[in-house]
Amino acid sequence: MAPPQGQMRPGRQLAVLGFIFVVLYLLVFFSGGASGGWKDRLEPRLGLDLIGGTRLTLEATNTVDGKPPTADNLEEARQIIESRVNAYGVAEAEVVTEGNRNIVISLPGQNRDLTDVGSAAELRFRKVLKATDGSGAAAAPAPSPSASAAPPGSVKPSGSASPKPSGSASPKPSAKVTASPSAGGQGGMAPAPGASATPTPSASPSAAAPSPSASAEPVPQSIEQQRQAVQQKVGAAAWAAASGLQAPADLAADPSLADKLKPFGTLSPQEIAVLPVEMQFNVPTITCAQLDKRPAASIKDPKQKAVACEAGAKNLLDVAKVEGTDVKNASAQLDQTSSWVVSLNFTGKGQEKWTALTRESFNNEGQACDQTALGQDGKCRVAVVLDNEIVSSPEIQGVLTGDSQITGSFDNRSANALASQLRYGALPVTFVPQEQQNVTATLGDSHLKAGLLAAGIGMLLVIIYSFFYYRLLGSVIFLSLVLSALLVFGALVVLGRSIGFTLTLAGIAGMIVSLGVAADSFVIYFERLKDEIREGRSPRSAVPRAWIRARRTIISANAITLMSAVVLYIVSVGAVKGFAFALGLATVLDLVVVFLFRHPIMTMFARTRAFLSPRVSGLGRALPARSAESGTARNPRVKEA
């Protein structure tokens, strides 16, 4: 027989809940990313504090003007660093900003060195205008027959064989850029001798980073004020002598000049950075050791000329005609000779800029390059500058209208590292690694066990209290908590695969807190049910009325908890954000269980004979004494205590 009009049909709500479970666990076992055995498919994505891993803190330094980084620059840097980390094939990494100058990188499940992902790497393509030899004097126009520390880089167009390397090496780079016969303008670029994808000893990441004293004591003065301070330090005579130089001085030819310029050799890298570009290049007592240790943002401005070293020789560089943002993609590949190369392609406007730069360099137009800056074939070179480093300065062998290829002495690691820097090179902020922590898997496993133990104890205490106080109704609480836990677990697995949600110790804490929210809704409902029975209603009629009166309170309480979780998620970072997400997720799923299980199952219990027994149902004195045979109340109204 059909139920009376307006009466609840609990089977429908339970069927909807069953459908939700079926869909959720189909996604758990068969959704994208599900692989391995059934045990592997049931594993949520765990955070660093639960399975171990690496955490690195990067601190942003002040600019040369002494100003702190802006919030927009910090967020842009965070996104670039996150892209660099993900380029290593690490999709589980968490990269967040902390405060107004720190970025924290967390990599669960792996212990690896992450310090290189925070290298400033301001990518610029600059034509080499002049060059010196290792002594600081102008380099000879002709290549020197002396051998260099590294073999000269070979050149090969995309899709063709590598040309034969030069038989002799010079301190001057011998790499070249040629047009590809098959691609109508494609070419290759190769790292120069001593300037392979990995930095040279004189231009290592540690050397390029600011010194501890510089990062700890940022200079608040403007560049002009700092320059005046340097002028006073070296003295008027030294400053005048340096300002009068039109080319790199030859100290062997003029020993008296060496004494005048000697004070420049005592300057710190921070002081060298504020000197005029021509002075940095022309003064031979300013060494590459000083230039390489300049703060990372020293040659950041693309509209100004710059000085950078390569293989111990100073290079005067033109303004940047192509920047890192013009690079569309860079990837490490194996060529036909099974050698690692870095393939470069540019954006639409970037390709136009690159073509114009290669045309200018090939034809020696615009700001002409000096004889000292020419390559072995007498063509101008273009330096690929990452912050203060020249990682490659190939000789331009033609006008390149297509993609380019960097070739040289690469291995898999160095090629991918250079490709990552080229692809995500334009960091707007300079960072100094502060602390890298490695959390062992053993410690993470102990955290996980402790968190699960705390959750289990919390749930057990709620269940024990429920059966002690509510008897039969305690089974409703127990089943509701089990269903909520299954829903939360399935959601964690699916969200971990779809949006990369990582469960941390803070997330487990949020779920434990949600147990209290769920327990509150039980108390509200059951106590309202007692009130209805005390007013003389039968259990069957009291259940729907108690639900109507308790529903608004339950929704309000859960809504407040949910809003708190949302606000906390928006304004927080790191572990606190995980706590807020887990709390909000558990609260939403608790509401699902309240509407689709708790109320329907209570409606079904109200129709049983056991529900009429005060000792069994847990309603206590709120339930009038009834005749087991007739089912009528002996005392229809019971005074409230």
Image: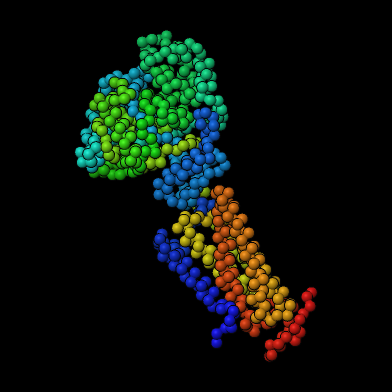
Q: Could you say where residue 280 lies in the image, as x and y percent from the top left?
A: 42, 21
- Left or right of 117: which side holds 329? left
Confirm whether residue 359 shows in the render. yes
Q: State how many labels appear.
A: 0
Residue at image location 44% in from the left, 41% down from the top: 117
* Outermost left residue: 181
Provide residue 236's location: percent of width, then percent of height: 50, 12
**In this picture, residue 383 sits left or right of residue 22:** left
| Vertical position of residue 441 compared to residue 322: above or below | below
Q: Position of residue 17 (x, y in %)?
A: 52, 71
Quarter of the figure that contains the N terminus: bottom right
Estimate the x, y position of residue 489 in percent, counting from the top left. 52, 63
Residue at x-position 26% and y-position 33%: 399
Residue drawn at the location 48% of the way across and 51% of the way down: 108
Residue nearer the viewer, 625 or 357 = 357
- Locate residue 325: give its quadrant: top left
Determine the residue positioned at 64% across, 62% down. Answer: 557
Quarter of the image for residue 605 reads: bottom right
User: 291 and 232: which one is in front?
Assistant: 232
**Which residue sits furthest bottom?**
629
